Amino acid sequence: MKKPIVIALICHKGGVGKTSSTVSLADALAATNPGKKVLIVDADEQSNVKTIFAIKMHEAEGGLASVLLDNASPSNVKIKVRDQIDVILSGGRRMREFERTHANTPNAELMMKLRFENLADYDFVVIDSPPALSLISSNIVTYADYLVLPSSPDLLSVVGVKNTLYFIENMQEVFKNSKTTVAQVLGILPTMYDSRRNVDMSIVDDYERMAEANLTGGGRVFSPIRTDIKVKTAQIKRKLLSEAFPSSKAAEDYQTLANEIMEQIKVRDAAKTSSKEEPTAKRQISSERAPEVNA
Ligand SMILES: Nc1ncnc2c1ncn2[C@@H]1O[C@H](COP(=O)(O)OP(=O)(O)OP(=O)(O)O)[C@@H](O)[C@H]1O
Ligand SMILES: [Mg+2]
């Protein structure tokens, strides 16, 4: 069964561009990979993905909340929004019911992974996360393969990134000795970036230093998404950025991001393969040497 690559946009800070980046990245991945299918999952009760795609209230019923609370199948609550793109909406305030109902349920952080396990129609799943770190965030981190941390150029956003990295590290620690794999940090994504502002450049420099010092959970710093009024204007027009303003700065930047993400995933896959091969190589060396030692 074909398994999709699951990428979540997550940061413990509001208004940093998680939703805008989720939608534009999904669109850019679809454009970069003709014929491939992308599913956007909105895991935030604010349901901003619904607004961006101008989805009507009656179509929006169910959603992720229904998958998690009523055992609905993800393929029954998906909505087609473009040729290559489907969405699963959050289900709005029922997401809070999920948090309440399963606050003390053992292994509740694995529910999303279990429910989405058999989803086979997609090549990519891109998840939008809420600004708080909660039970749904734990579910996102265990279900996703990779995490991208959007960060706007301000101090509070940097704190949000650090909190998120700490949260992910804790989750990795919790599941260290289990079969459950926790998502890897693919990178930090500077958003709303303006190279004329010193503070924007110095924050990106700080992230680069953190990445070099291996303080970003193994993630890189992606090329920034420039601040661009066209992002807001496209949303007001209820159009994708690539449809309303295909040659805007931000549309270009999201295309670059899609390419960088594809490259980074290849690098990670190659590293995984070589680390799997390494023990065999070591075993071969030790068995070749064994007769010498015995002799
Ligand atoms: N590159 C950009 N240039 C200009 N404005 C942007 C850019 N990216 C996002 N915005 C705007 O910033 C605001 C916040 O973005 P968005 O809703 O994507 O953030 P968020 O992290 O999802 O917020 P929340 O935590 O509330 O879910 C929106 O009005 C959006 O249109
Ligand atoms: Mg949002």
Image (spheres, rainbow, N blue to C red):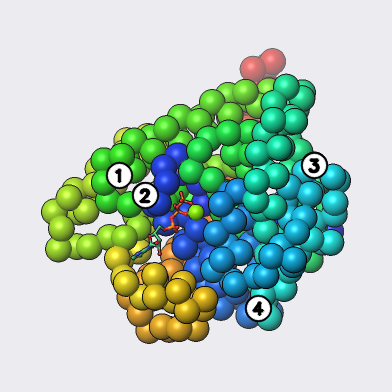
Q: Nearer the viewer, residue 184 or 226?
A: 226
Q: Secondary structure at mark 3?
A: helix
The residue that appears at 41% across and 42% down in the rendered structure is 13
The CA distance from mark 1 to mark 3 is 38 Å
Mark toward the start of the polypeptide (4 vs 2): 4
For the residues labelled 1 and 3, say whether their Cβ atoms are less than 8 Å apart.
Answer: no
Percent across and percent down for residue 261 are: 49, 60
Q: Nearer the viewer, residue 268 or 6?
A: 6
For the residues labelled 1 and 2, say whether their Cβ atoms are less than 8 Å apart.
Answer: yes
Residue type for callout 2: Ser
Mark toward the start of the polypeptide (1 vs 3): 3
Q: Nearer the viewer, mark 1 or mark 3?
A: 3
- Asked if residue 192 lies left or right of residue 47, the reply is left
Q: Nearer the viewer, mark 4 or mark 1?
A: 4
The residue that appears at 27% across and 60% down in the rendered structure is 193
The CA distance from mark 4 to mark 3 is 27 Å
In terms of image quarters, where does ligand 1 lie?
bottom left
Please determine whether, in this image, residue 2 is positioned above or below residue 102. Answer: below
Q: Which mark is residue 69?
A: 3
Q: Which residue lies most toward the front here?
A: 57
For the residues labelled 4 and 1, say whether their Cβ atoms are less than 8 Å apart.
Answer: no
- Mark 2 CB lies closer than 8 A to ligand 1: no
For the residues labelled 4 and 2, say whether their Cβ atoms are less than 8 Å apart.
Answer: no
